[in-house]
Structures are given as structure tokens and as C-alpha cells.
Amino acid sequence: DLWLLRMDGSGTITWQKTYGTPGEDNGDVFATADGGYAICGFSTGAADQTTAWIAKLDAAGAIVWQKQIAPADAGFSAAQLLSDGGFLLSGNAFDMNTFTFTFKMARLNSSGAIVWQKEYPSSRMLTGVPQQLSDGSFIVSGTDIDFESGSTGIWVMKLASTGAIQWQKSYGGASDDIGGLIVPVSGGYFLSGQTNSFGPGAGSDEFNILLLKLDASGNIVWQRVYGDQLSVILDYLA
């Protein structure tokens, strides 16, 4: 179960509650505009099957509503609160018949009802986390993976608020590259990643930092490599 407590300014507990389903639960808690809270999480049940779990709480922590979204094989593995009070789910679904992965997203309204669900099939496994932009659209940055060879590249997908693809592009070179954070800036985006394709030690076991400036359509304006034959993991882009 998930344990949540509320404290006042002096650290005194004003209330504490536990929430959950019959399975094993985990999730994140967000403050909502109405003074309440939202839990965006996941429940793992029999045979390690996972479902998305969303709960809306009032200011006192009482459950207003809660839902488990889609069947256990839906593939959702990340959830976030949107600017309109709704929710966005994302993740990968694996098809046992074709042995392929499909990146999936679902948008829910503030009552937990599904507004739309989209699938984005690819010949490669797509992993990434979407973020909502100021105009209500979405951008996903992550990594595409060849399921057979294990080779990787940097992947970005831009979506309208309806989930329709506006553009998607891959970046990198002949060796492995791993996607990182993407940050919207005036006229485009900064995209971070790790590269084994460019810079000192390219093609070896060493990774360098890769920073790209993209225009609004995802085209490369410039790219820079930082490193000195050292394996570098970029966690945050300042």
C-alpha cells in the first residue's frame, strides 16, 4: 500500500492514511488545484501483472474516486498530472505473438475517464517519458532500441494535445547513443544524451555527453560533444 501523511508548519501530523488495491502498490502524490491530491501509481497483482492506478483525494485525504486503468497487459508504466487536472499514462506493451513492443499513451480527464488512447508502433523498442508543453501539446524524449542487436539511438516524438504525431526523429551515429532530457527553449529545444558515436573514445566502451539544439520541427541546429574518454551519465540538464 501507499502511505500518505499531512503535516502542518510545525511538523505536527494533521492526518495520515494508507491507500491501495489488493495487489502491491506504489506511486507519486500531486497537489491539485482544488486543494486536494492525486495519486498516480501502479498496482502489481497476480503473476506480476501491473495496472495503472489513479486516485483523487480531497483536502482531508479522503478518496473521492479511484480507478485501475485498462487490462493488466496494457503496458503503462509512468503516470503524471496534467495542467487541466487530468492525467497522462505512458509505457510499452509487449505483443507475445509478434514479439514486438508498442509505445502507448492514454489521456484521462480530471474524473479519471479516458479521453484518448494511442499506440505508436515501431520496428524498435521505444522508451521515453512524455512531458506536457505550455501550449498543451506533448514531447517525448528517450531511446530507441533494436530488440535483436541491442543497438540504441536517441528518439524524440512531438505530439499534438490529441496525441496525434506531429513529428518524430532519431539522433546519433553508428554506435550506441542514449536519450536524456529535452527542454523547450525559444524557437526549439535543447536535447541531452550520451553518445558512443561521437567524441573521444567513440566506438569503445566509453560514453560522452551529447548536447543538441533543435528547431521547432526537430531539425538539428547544432550539436556538441563533451567528454574525455570517460563514461558520463547526464542526470539533469541545468
Image (cartoon, grey):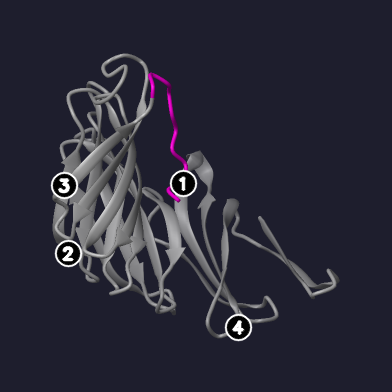
Work out how far the residue at label 1 is from the one at label 4, CA to CA, in angstroms.
30 Å
How packed is label 2: few (under 14 Cα within 10 Å), some, or many (20 or more)?
some
Q: Earlier in the sequence, mark 2 or mark 4?
A: 4
Mark 4 in CB contact with mark 3 (< 8 angstroms): no
Q: Nearer the viewer, residue 137 or 29?
A: 137
- Quick one: which residue is furthest to the bottom in this view? 34
Mark 2 is on which residue type?
A: Ala
Rendered residue at 52%/82% (across/down): 33
Mark 4 is on which residue type?
A: Gly
Residue 237 magenta: yes
Q: Earlier in the sequence, mark 3 or mark 2?
A: 2
Mark 3 in CB contact with mark 2 (< 8 angstroms): no
Residue at mark 3: 220
User: Which residue range is magenta in the image?
Assistant: 228-238
Residue 115 magenta: no
Mark 1 in CB contact with mark 4 (< 8 angstroms): no
